[in-house]
Amino acid sequence: MDLQQNGQVAGDTIQPRMTQRIVLVEDDSDIAEILRVNLAREGFTLDVFTRGDSALAAIRSLPPDLVLLDLMLPGLDGLELCRMLKRDPKTSAVPLIMLTAKGTETDRIVGLELGADDYIAKPFSPREVILRIKSVLRRQADEEKTGDVLRAGKIEMSLGSHTLKVEGDEVPLTATEFKLLQFLMQRAGRVQTRMVLLTEVWAYSEGVDSRTVDTHVRRLRRKLGVDADRIETLVGVGYRFRP
């Protein structure tokens, strides 16, 4: 596969049957080609970059609907790229799924702490990647359809504009953090097990590490500041939002 000097794979922009555009940052040409073919069948537009630095410039210039991000990259590693995207107001709301090597649990946790919405461990099946992509994009679309406002204490969530305010100050959330808080607030006072949260928020059915939930809750609490203790932990069971 021919590569351009800027790190983008030549000819890897697919004409879409849908409007959603995905940026894949992956320096393994075999993986990139497999995903290119399978995502094209699903109607996605796909741009592939092999370097983290060139991908960062392109994403900032024209934010996509979703980023698929490998962690081991030349130019700029995946974790640093994730950190920079989530700190930039132009790209902070772009959903991001990490592609991680099997066994790199620390990198996965760090990535989730930085704001990644999901992770997929290698080796993976193209079908799994497609299902995860659709799940993340569906969560974001669902949030944009409703115009309700949820309030509790110093917390105010506007579901229509996809914004969170704590003590009147806007707090940036990833798509998954927003969906998780929305789910807990809409069921305030009721205990939600980790399995329920994985099924309803992440759209998983089985075999998913429940620590994904714990990592997102930990990150969400930090962002809620004075109202962090409204998300209560029930040891061995799950979480409950205190109304």
Image (cartoon, rainbow, N blue to C red):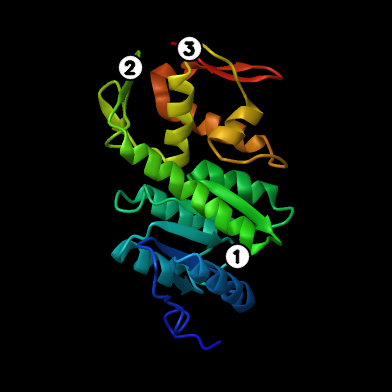
Q: Is residue 100 left or right of residue 88?
A: right
Which amino acid type corresponds to the residue marked 2 in the rendered image? Lys
Residue 135, percent from left and from top: 51, 47
Residue 207, percent from left and from top: 73, 42
Residue at 49 percent across and 72 percent down: it is: 51
Q: Is residue 90 left or right of residue 195?
A: left
Residue at 47 percent across and 15 percent down: it is: 188
Comes first in the chain, label 3 or label 2: 2
Q: Quadrant of the C terminus?
A: top left
Label 3: which secondary element: loop
Single out the mark in the foreground, 3 or 2: 3
Residue at 56 percent across and 58 percent down: it is: 130
Between residue 89 and residue 43, name the one nearer to us.
43
Label 2: which secondary element: loop
Q: In this view, does 164 lie to the left or right of 82?
A: left
Q: Tell me the number on the disc at residue 219.
A: none
Considering every residue shown, the one lying at the far bottom of the view is: 2
| Mark 3–mark 1 CB contact (< 8 Å) | no
Mark 2 is surrounded, within 10 Å at the Cα level, by few (under 14), some (14 to 19) or many (20 or more) other residues, namely: some
Question: Badge 2 is on which residue?
Answer: 154
Q: Quadrant of the N terminus?
A: bottom right
Question: Badge 1 is on which residue?
Answer: 72
In 3D space, how far apart are the residues under numbered discs 2 and 1 (Cα atoms)? 40 Å
Between residue 134 and residue 228, name the one nearer to us.
134
Residue 200, percent from left and from top: 55, 33
In 3D space, how far apart are the residues under numbered discs 3 and 1 (Cα atoms)? 40 Å
| Mark 2–mark 1 CB contact (< 8 Å) | no
Q: In this view, does 113 lie to the left or right of 149?
A: right
Question: Badge 3 is on which residue?
Answer: 242
